[in-house]
Image (tube, helix red, strand yellow):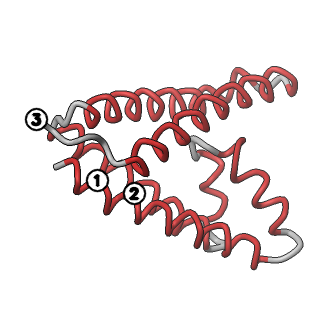
Amino acid sequence: MAARMPRFVASYKVLYLVALVANLWLTAMWTTESGITPGKTEIYWINGSVLLLNVLAGAGALMRMRAAVRLERVLSVGRMIVLIGASTVVLGGLVVYSPVYMVLWRHVFRLAKESLLILWITVAALMAAEVTYFRKLRELS
């Protein structure tokens, strides 16, 4: 019988899924209020597909499916790449397409106008959480 999913992995996944759903909702509200809906369909495709991938991977990982655990690792590496990009001012603009832009990055970059230290502390904390998540995924294999 398979062991339970590590608590950190389950908590992190639920938190991330809630952030994805909130981001999709906030994006819809923002585009409706600003009237930018026609040209911003790529944001919906990115948010929706990332949400779907995360739901499928999370459900599969919960059932200990190897392919789903591998997909979780790939998604985790993708989040780490976004974090590395966000930490550099030059690539920070790419975060607009992040599936958690409206929930997280918009506010972090607004605060980072005061000091880049805020950006780097946020990225360091998120990277530590993501590396911990990635390492805990081994317990599912």
Under circle 2, the secondary element is helix
Identify the disc placed on residue 137: 1
Q: Amino acid at mark 1?
A: Leu
Element carrying mark 1 = helix
Residue furthest out toward the left:
1
Residue 60: numbered disc: none
Are circles 3 and 2 on residues that touch, CB within 8 Å?
Answer: no
Q: Residues within 10 Å of mark 2 (few under 14, many from 20)?
A: many
Q: Is residue 70 above or below residue 122?
A: above
Total labels: the figure holds 3
Which mark identifies residue 133? 2
Report whether 60 appears left or right of 40: left
Q: Give residue 70's position: percent from left, percent from top.
A: 22, 47
How far, Cα to Cα, is label 1 from label 3? Answer: 18 Å
Q: Position of residue 97 (x, y in %)?
A: 59, 45
Is disc 1 surrounded by few (<14), some (14 to 19) or many (20+) residues within 10 Å? many
Q: CB atoms at circles 1 and 2 under 8 Å apart?
A: yes
Which residue is found at the position 74% from the left and 30% from the top?
Answer: 26
Q: What SS does tag 3 mark?
A: loop
Find residue 17 and report its horizontal and vertical position in percent: 52, 35
Q: Quadrant of residue 72?
A: top left
Q: Amino acid at mark 2?
A: Tyr
| Precedes in sequence: disc 3 or disc 2 | 3
Q: Earlier in the sequence, mark 1 or mark 3?
A: 3
Residue beneath disc 3 = 1
Residue 27: which quarter of the image?
top right
- Nearer to us of marks 1 and 3 is 3
Expressed as whole percent of the image width and height from the top left, the position of residue 84 reads: 52, 69
Q: CA distance from mark 3 to mark 2?
A: 23 Å
The front one of 139 and 81 is 139
Front-most of residues 38 and 69 = 69
Asked if residue 96 is positioned above or below residue 131 in the image, the reply reads: above
